Image: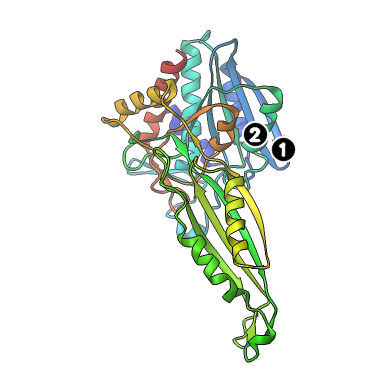
Amino acid sequence: MSDVLQLTRDLIARPSVTPDDAGCQQLVAERLGRAGFACERLRFGAVDNLWATHGGGDGPVLVLLGHTDVVPPGPRDAWASDPFAPEVRDGVLFGRGAADMKGSVAAFVVALERFVAVHPDHAGTVALLLTSDEEGDAVDGVRRVAELFRERGQRIDWCITGEPSSTSTLGDLLRVGRRGTLSATLTVKGIQGHVAYPEKARNPIHQSLAALAELAWKHWDQGYESFPPTSLQISNIHAGTGANNVIPGELQVLFNLRYNPNWTAAQLEAECEALLGEYGLDFSVQWQRGGEPFHTPEGPLRAAAREVLAGFAGAPPEESTGGGTSDARFIAPLGAQCVEIGPVNASIHKVDEHIAVADLEALPDLYHALLERLLG
C-alpha cells in the first residue's frame, strides 16, 4: 500500500465532523515534526489549527492550505460501507473526506516530506496550514489564524489550496480566484389584520413584491475578467401565521449575493438598502460577510501551476473562478497569490464519497512538482 493511500485511510478513520479534528492534525504534526518542520498548534474555541513551517530567511513563503474537518455523513445505512471505515473497491477509495479533503492533506504531507528531504536548505519557507473549521462556521479557523498572522506580520507570498477542483480528470482545472459571498436576512414590518379589512392592516408581502423582483432581476455588472456577473439569489421567504384569513405583520427574506471584484461587500450592502428604501418599506437587514472575492493575476504561481497541471492532465487546464468559497478567501487579503488544485470533485458531500486510488497516488507528485518549480 502506498504511503499516501495509507495516510489518507488513517485520516478518514478519524471521524472529524466539523469542528472536531479527532486527532488528524496530531497525526500530521508528528510526521512533519520528524521531517524537521516546526509545528505550532493554534486552538481557538472548539477549533484546532496547525501551522507547520520549514526553512526561513528572506525568500518566498509558500503555504499549502487544507482542512481536516468533514461534513456529517448522513444516514449510515445509505452508504455501501461505513463512511469512517475507509475501503478500496475496484481501484476507488471510499470514505467521508476521501475527496474533500483528506486525500489532498495526505498528499500535502507526503510531498512536503519528499521536498525537504531532497532540499533541506531550500529557498524561502514552505508551510502547511490546516484547520478543523472549514466545513462549519469558518470563524475560529483560517479566518482567525489570518487575523493572528496579520498581527504578527507573517507574510505569505503564494498559497495552494487542496480543495477538490478538478472536473473529470486530475489537473484539468486550475482555480485562480473565487467570488465573494454576502448573505442577508431582510425583515419587513407590516401591520397584522384580517384579510377582509385590508384598510386596517399593512401587508408586508404585497409591499415587498416589487422591491424583491427588482433585486432578483437586477443586472449588477458584466463580469470581471474570468469571473461571471454578480448574481443575487433569494433562498427563503417566510411570513404569516399559517391561517389564510390573516394578513401577516412581518415578512422575512433570506438572500445571497455571489460577486466579483467589481464590488465590495460594503458597496453591495449600500446598493441593496438604497433600492429597498426607494419602495418606502419599514425594513431592517442583517448582513453576514462570508469573504471578499480574490483573483490571482499572471505571475510565478499561476504560470507554475498551469505548466505542472498541463503535464498531469495532458492539456492546459481550464482557468476558472467558479464554485463556492474556500479558506483561501482569508489568506488572499494578506497579500498572497492563491490558486486551488485538487482531485475530482464529483462525489464531495455525497453518500459514498470517493477518490480514484490512481488520482490519489498522483497527487503527491503533482504537489511536489509545484514545490520544485517554486522553491526548488
Residue at 37 percent across and 39 percent down: it is 166
Q: Quadrant of residue 200?
A: bottom right
Secondary-structure class at tag 2: strand
Decide which of 37, 337 is in the foreground and name it: 337
Q: Is residue 180 left or right of residue 198?
A: left
Point out the residue furthest to the right here: 45
Q: Judge whether residue 342 can be spotted in this image.
A: yes
Against 270, residue 225 (above or below) is: above
Amino acid type at mark 1: Phe
Percent x, y of residue 255: 55, 59
- Callout 1: 10 Å neighbours few (<14), some, many (20+)? few
Q: Which residue is located at x 41 percent, y 49 percent?
A: 347
Q: Position of residue 114 (x, y in %)?
A: 46, 18
Horizontal placement of 301 versus 212: left or right?
left
Looking at the picture, the colour scheme in use is rainbow
Q: Residues under labels 1 and 2: Cα distance?
A: 8 Å
Q: From this viewpoint, which residue is outermost toward the bottom? A: 196
* Residue sitting nearer the eye, 244 or 190: 190
Residue 165 location, x and y as percent? 41, 39
Is 196 positioned to the left or the right of 319 in the image?
right
Give above or below for 197 relative to 335: below
Question: Which SS class for mark 1?
Answer: strand
User: What residue is rendered at 46% in x and 42% in y?
Assistant: 98
Q: Which residue is mark 1?
A: 44
Question: Which disc is residue 49 wearing?
Answer: 2
| Amino acid at dot 2 | Asn
Rendered image: mark on residue 75: none
Q: 29 or 201, which is in the foreground?
A: 201
Circles 1 and 2: CB atoms closer than 8 Å: yes
The image quadrant of residue 374 is top left
Q: Is residue 194 visible?
A: no
